[in-house]
Image (tube, rainbow, N blue to C red):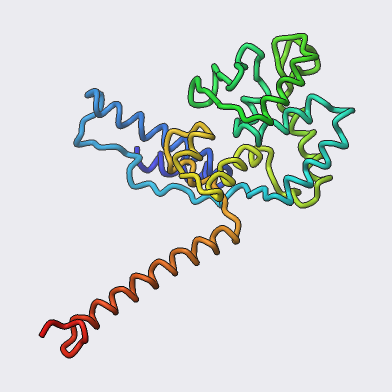
Amino acid sequence: MRADIARHFHEYGRRKPGGANRSHDILRNMFDCAIARGYRSEAAGNPCKGIVRDRRPPRGRLLGADDLARLSAVLRQREDESPVFVAAVRLLPLTGCRPGEIRCLRWCEIKPDRLTLMDAKTGSRHVLLGEAARELLIGLAETATGAWVFPGRSEDEPLNKHDLYGFWLKARDAAGTVADARLHDLRHAPASHAVMNGESLHVAGRLLGHRRASTTNRYVYLVDATLSRATERVALSIHRMLLESTCREADREPGSRHTNA
């Protein structure tokens, strides 16, 4: 059985390493559950254990201040012809929501200070709104007529996934400096900038709706300037500790002017 699982995993991994890793997690958990409930003996063990997961190259990138400024300029140019798409793209970095959560957002989920998402990836959750996000939604509410904040080709359905992605590709290419960025990277921008502004990884994770800090850590990108400042702070702190240690050693040496007679 283990040989069959390993063969399937590696064949699948050559085509879709991410999908192979996910299927491996699901199957491993199923066998753990079967063992815990007595459907499989503990002696037989979990045949998924020992199979090495595929290493996926890092995905995504940090959208810095220049990137966001260029993207904002492109969105302003397209505001009259594609107001729904422009507003949806703008709301992503302002909230840290997933593209699907924004695309399928309903007016009944919007409260004065937050979004109350009923069907998020990790279950229902609240997303606090900053002033810019609140103003954007208030402006949309003035002309709203249906249940969806971002209606699709008809008001009875939300914005189509492929239509939003197509708009993003055109806006991204026009912005130039974000030509390799994904739509999903807009969601990670607030977490990265929160950490660079001194917020903890826990706070950044709450912004994104993550349950584990390890998940957030995969999606937080830091610019070199932030890392450089951190390097200087750490080096200075260690340098001071070394100096203090040297002074204490000097005070303990015979003949030191601080040594008691």
**Which residue occupies 73% across, 23% down?**
160
- Residue 223 screen position, x and y as percent: 60, 56
- Residue 133 lies in quadrant: top right
Residue placed farthest to the front in the image? Answer: 261
Q: Nearer the viewer, residue 181 or 235?
A: 235
Question: In which quadrant of the rendered view does residue 77 lie?
Answer: top right
Q: Is residue 96 above or below residue 149?
A: below
Q: Position of residue 55 (x, y in %)?
A: 49, 51
Tell me residue 248's x, y (percent). 24, 76
Residues 181 and 81: in front is 81
Which sits in the foreground, 64 or 124? 64
Question: Looking at the image, which residue is at 54% across and 23% down?
Answer: 120
Residue 213 located left or right of residue 110? left
Q: Is residue 38 above or below residue 27?
A: above
The quarter of the image holding the C terminus is bottom left
Q: Nearer the viewer, residue 166 or 131?
A: 131
From the image, which quarter does the N terminus lie in? top left
